[in-house]
Image (spheres, grey):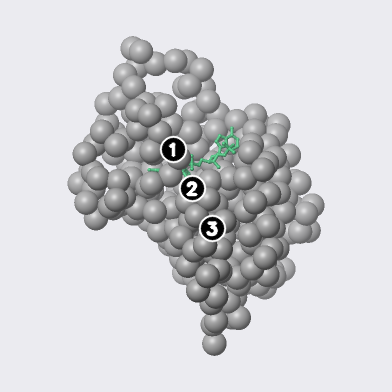
Amino acid sequence: MNVRDPNAGRTEAADHGVAAADAGAADGDAPLAGCAALVTGASSGIGAATALSLARQGAAVTVVARRTGRLEELATLIRERGGSCSVLTADLADAVQARRAVEDAVDRFARLDVLVNNAGYVAMGPVEEGNPADWERMVNLNFNAVLHMSQTALPHLLRAAADGPRGIADLVNVSSVGGRVVRKNNGIYSATKHAVGAFSEALRQEVTGRSIRVGLIEPGMTATEMATGPGSAAARGIPQNVWLRAEDVARAITFVITQPAHVAINEIMVRPTAQEH
Ligand SMILES: NC(=O)c1ccc[n+]([C@@H]2O[C@H](COP(=O)([O-])OP(=O)(O)OC[C@H]3O[C@@H](n4cnc5c(N)ncnc54)[C@H](OP(=O)(O)O)[C@@H]3O)[C@@H](O)[C@H]2O)c1
């Protein structure tokens, strides 16, 4: 029977934009027991919610981003709930650091069963007024980091699939509705997310016969730091109180990862009900 403390993580989880109900400890029949997961961009938003969710499913989680303090708070929360969490600080827009983060994560728990490439950055606006430094940051973080981390992770995921408790390993890339739907003033972000989608499908075909699942998650408007900042998609006219919460997306990611080994959910687009496009 699963028992959850109704007060679990109320304050600390709220600091990461995560509902307290999603911050509980691993359930008794944890489907990810004995597995290790690496979640990028876990210092806030969807990444933090995903790390909490995977820990609750029994995974030992390594969390990576640039804000070490936020990651340490998250790790404390996970440990208080009986989970295992290790913190890595890295700027994943740098290819060397991105690759090293994977190897460091493998060192921490001596295996890697799950990689969630979630870290992302958006800078909106027309191309004519765009700052090339912002373009490079989006390309390097949203796309190049996914390439480098995925390639570095593959041998470890293959090993986990061969000798792990589940007989399967998971690589999940967080794209966006913008990875399917192009809008003006969002061209570079949208291009990076389209690239993530193309890469994910090609990689899926390459590794699927070797028991690695590659999943793609395409969230719509989600109330995180990224989307609520200045110049964000708030202009699209959807009231923020009906946007997705970070844990709504984390639930979709966890759903993909916790399927039986013979079931591969390749792609999920998840929008607020009120979002038309
Ligand atoms: N929110 C939405 O409406 C929405 C919609 C569709 C898709 N998405 C996607 O969802 C993913 C998560 O975004 P979010 O909404 O949860 O936003 P968020 O709260 O702003 O989270 C972004 C995460 O990425 C990390 N990050 C940024 N630059 C980094 C770098 N150079 N190196 C390492 N980590 C870095 C941030 O941590 P640090 O700052 O500590 O490094 C943070 O943990 C992104 O891929 C985003 O494109 C979001």
From the image, which quarter does the N terminus lie in?
bottom right
Which residue type carries mark 1?
Met
Classify mark 2: residues with Cα within 10 Å, few (<14), some (14-19) or many (20+).
many
The picture quadrant where one finds residue 41 is top right
- On the image, the x and y values in percent for residue 156 come to 70, 54
Mark closest to the chain's N terminus, 1 or 3 = 3
Res 237 seen here: yes
The picture quadrant where one finds residue 270 is bottom left
Of 219 and 166, nearer the camera is: 219
Q: Is residue 184 left or right of residue 55?
A: left
Distance from mark 1 CB to nearest ligand 1 atom below 8 Å: yes
- On the image, the x and y values in percent for residue 211 come to 58, 63
The residue that label 2 is drawn on is: 45
Spot the residue most to the bottom: 1
Distance from mark 2 CB to nearest ligand 1 atom below 8 Å: yes
Q: Residue at x 34, y 17 (%)?
A: 127
Which residue type carries mark 2?
Gly
Q: Residue at x 50, y 74 (%)?
A: 6
